[in-house]
Amino acid sequence: MELNLTGLTSALATFLGIWLGHVSVRYLEARLTDIRPAMATCVLLGLGLWAGALLAQAAPVSAALGILGITLLWDAFELYRQEKRVRIGHAPANPRNPRHARFLSEYPSATTLDLLDREPLGRPLTPEEAIRAVKKD
C-alpha cells in the first residue's frame, strides 16, 4: 500500500505558512523603517515558490510549494495592511521606529498599547476599559 502524503504536507504547509506569516508580518512591520523591500522580497519568493510548484514532480512537494507561495504573496499585502492597522490604532506602534514615531505624531488614533494583550471579558470593551485592561502596572 502506497501512502498519499499530499494532504499531510498541504496541512503542514498551510499551518506553518499562516503561523510564520502572521508572526513575521507583525515583527517586520514594527521594526522596519521601510516595508517596501520586505514586500518585494515576499512577492519574489512567493512567485519563485509557485514556479517550483509548477516544476515539482511529486504532488506533495508541489502542493506545499504552492501553498507557501500564495502565503508569501498574501504576506506582502498584509505588511501594507498592518501598517494601516498601526495608523488607525488597531495594532500597537513601536515608538523606537521612526516610521511609527511619525504615525504617532500624525494620527491621533495611533497608540503604543497592544489591545490584544489582555484577558478576554467575553464582551466588547469601551475605549476606557480597553486602556485599563492593557495598562501594565
Image (spheres, grey):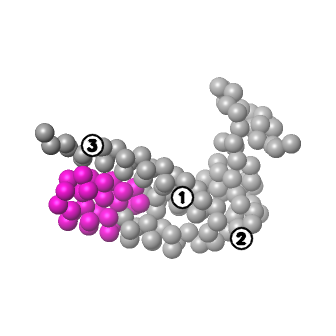
Q: Residue 7: which numbered mark, if any?
A: 3
Give the main secondary structure of the magenta stretch. Answer: helix
Identify the residue at image location x=71%, y=70%: 98
> Is tag 2's residue or tag 3's residue first in the polypeptide sequence?
3
Q: Nearer the viewer, mark 3 or mark 1?
A: 3
Q: Of residues 106 and 114, which is closer to you in this image? A: 114
Which residue lies under the disc numbered 1? 24
Which residue lies under the disc numbered 2? 98
- Quarter of the image for the N terminus: give it: top left
Q: Quadrant of residue 128?
A: top right
The magenta segment: 47-73
Looking at the image, which residue sits at the far top?
Answer: 122
Tell me which amino acid carries mark 1: Ser
Q: Secondary structure at mark 2?
A: helix
Above or below residue 125? Residue 87 is below
Q: Nearer the viewer, mark 1 or mark 2?
A: 1
> How far, Cα to Cα, is label 3 from label 1?
25 Å
Can residue 69 be seen in this snapshot?
A: yes
Q: Secondary structure at mark 1?
A: helix
| Residue 111 screen position, x and y as percent | 74, 53
